[in-house]
Image (cartoon, grey):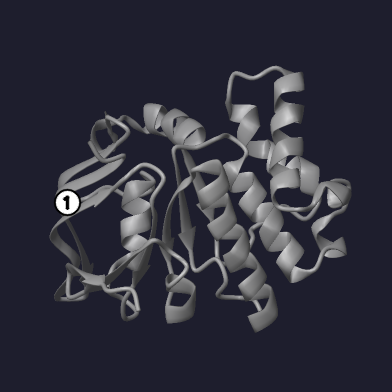
Amino acid sequence: MALVELRGVSRSFHKGDETITPLDNIDLDIQAGEFMSLMGPSGTGKSTLLNLVSGIDRPDSGTIMVDGTEVTKLSRGKLADWRAANLGYIFQTHNLIPVLTAYENVELPTLLLKLSSQQRRQRVNLALEAVGLSDRADHYPRQLSGGQEQRVGIARAIVAHPKVVVADEPTGSLDVETSEQIQVLLQRLNQELDITMLMVTHDSDVASIASRQMVLDRGKFLERVRS
């Protein structure tokens, strides 16, 4: 059984008198440990898909299963608990809290879990080590470069040992050199830590680091053949 399963998922939005359906009765399987990238024109539902998988939004119809849990049936309270334990989110802009250090930003998701202070400390240190920022733990976001801030955001996404990490344009606000460094990091985390990843990007070069590349257009999926 796939780690992530979407069956018959549809999502529509109303814009004035117009109904827009970015996702139309879609099916999708993502295997455990898989790194899937998703491309497509703007407005085709890529970010909508991430929000549905992560439980931030709900489909109009269909079911979404993650590791055997039907996310679409969870109450708001249970959904928050499930998300804290099972899902990591990497944003285009790091979304760090400026008054917290790198360590404290990474620690935030662990505060929602039933962990001792020692367990939290161990997880945060391991996450910072995984992204190469152990020596920046006490730095505030204003003291970090853009690439370092994004690395902290990635550490925050993996600190709870989630089943799935979703990434929405994780290199979109970075320069070319820093983007390449983040690409290498994401690929390494997927391979070495066996983290399942679903990444949205507009950049075909970024998409190509994934083991499986999909294109979403007009509400349907097409698989992109690796060159």
Examine the rendered structure and indicate whether residue 39 appears above or below residue 31.
Answer: below
On the question of residue 221 being in view, the answer is: yes
> Going 57% across and 50% down the picture, which residue do you hit?
189
On the question of residue 203 being in view, the answer is: no
Q: Where is residue 9 in the image (x, y as percent from the top left)?
A: 16, 52
In depth, the one of 43 and 89 nearer the eye is: 89
The image quadrant of residue 214 is bottom left
* Residue under label 1: 60
> Going 62% across and 53% down the picture, which residue do you hit?
154
Q: Residue furthest front?
A: 227
Count of marks placed on residues? 1
Examine the rendered structure and indicate whether residue 85 appears above or below residue 168.
Answer: above
Q: Position of residue 181 (x, y in %)?
A: 66, 69
Q: Where is residue 129 in the image (x, y as percent from the top left)?
A: 75, 45
Side (left or right) of 220 relative to 183: left
Q: Where is residue 215 in the image (x, y as percent from the top left)?
A: 27, 72
Q: Is mark 1 on a helix, strand or loop?
A: loop
> Going 43% across and 64% down the picture, which residue do you hit?
210
Placement of the N terminus among the 4 image quadrants? top left
> Going 27% across and 47% down the picture, which residue do you hit?
58
